[in-house]
Image (spheres, rainbow, N blue to C red):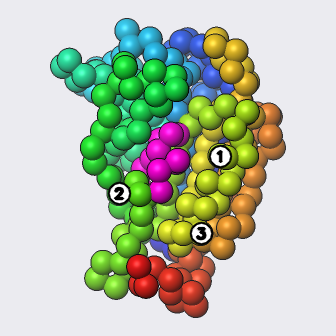
Amino acid sequence: MQDLKVSLVQTNQLWEDKKGNLAHFNTLLSQIERTDLIILPEMFHTGFTMQIDLAENMEDSSALRWLIDQAQIKNAALYTSLIIREKEHVYNRGVFVEPNGTITYYDKRKTFSLANEDKFFTSGNNQVIVPYAGWNIQLQICYDLRFPELSRNEIIDDRPIYDLCIYVANWPARRSEHWKTLLKARAIENQCYVIGVNRIGTDANQLNYSGDSSINNMLGDSLLCRAGEEQVLTQNISLTELNDLRKQLPFLKDK
């Protein structure tokens, strides 16, 4: 598959209300007729909370079960993050769920110290690139965006190691220009598509979120969701177009 149809779900999140959020996402996903990949904001069914009592185990997570069911129903992969507990550790864990039930997970490497996330959550250590539908997709979460070394693309066996980088986020509106600028920068410097999906609304900490979810190509051209509005944006991205541009502008090989 050379084209990938991606759906960005930009929405408000109910604070620490798992059932309410899942019900709302049911409604939003019902709007999507056909797609290959659905992306939801960070900590999709709780909001960005430090209440680690809300953590679930991978083995019996109702949220993960919901994601698996939706992947089968929509015949599409889903990527988001949720709070996961493993023994004495709690992670802000990204999960990439495929229609066949395969789950690839990524633990957020840069916990957000400004919100004390580092005091409640264990940081991940590993880069994760998942192959899906002919694409190599790097998984990232929110604050990771500020650290370009985490997403550095490179050429191995004459091919870039990934084609698409995804950031799911709860990124406050007061730093929205940073969000939009850094997403575009990551796309240009790594010669890849970059997708960022952020929430809207106001959380229990009185932080406002403008969304500004976007699809960015390697030239820095962006397709943005409407700021501050709930929206499901579905768009094709082209691997053929990406590879043609990489041949015209072979910057990665000079690294």
Q: Which mark is residue 179?
A: 1
Q: How crowded is mark 1: few (under 14 residues within 10 Å), some or many (20 or more)?
A: many
Of the 4 image quadrants, the one containing the C terminus is bottom left
Element type where label 3 sits in the image: helix
Residue closest to the far left = 87
Q: Position of residue 18 (x, y in %)?
A: 51, 15
Q: Which residue is drawn at 38% across and 13% down?
A: 52
For marks 3 and 1, give the CA distance.
14 Å
Q: What kind of residue is marked 1?
A: Trp
Q: Residue at x 67, y 46 (%)?
A: 178
For marks 2 and 3, give the CA distance.
19 Å
Residue corresponding to mark 2: 129
Q: Residues within 10 Å of mark 2 (few under 14, many from 20)?
A: many
Q: What kind of residue is marked 3?
A: Ile
CB-based contact (under 8 Å), mark 2 and mark 1: no
Q: Position of residue 228 (x, y in %)?
A: 79, 34
For marks 2 and 1, give the CA distance.
22 Å
Q: Which residue is drawn at 60% across and 48% down?
A: 196
Residue corresponding to mark 3: 188
Q: Which of marks 3 and 1 is nearer the N terminus?
A: 1
Element type where label 2 sits in the image: strand
Q: Residue at x 66, y 73 (%)?
A: 219
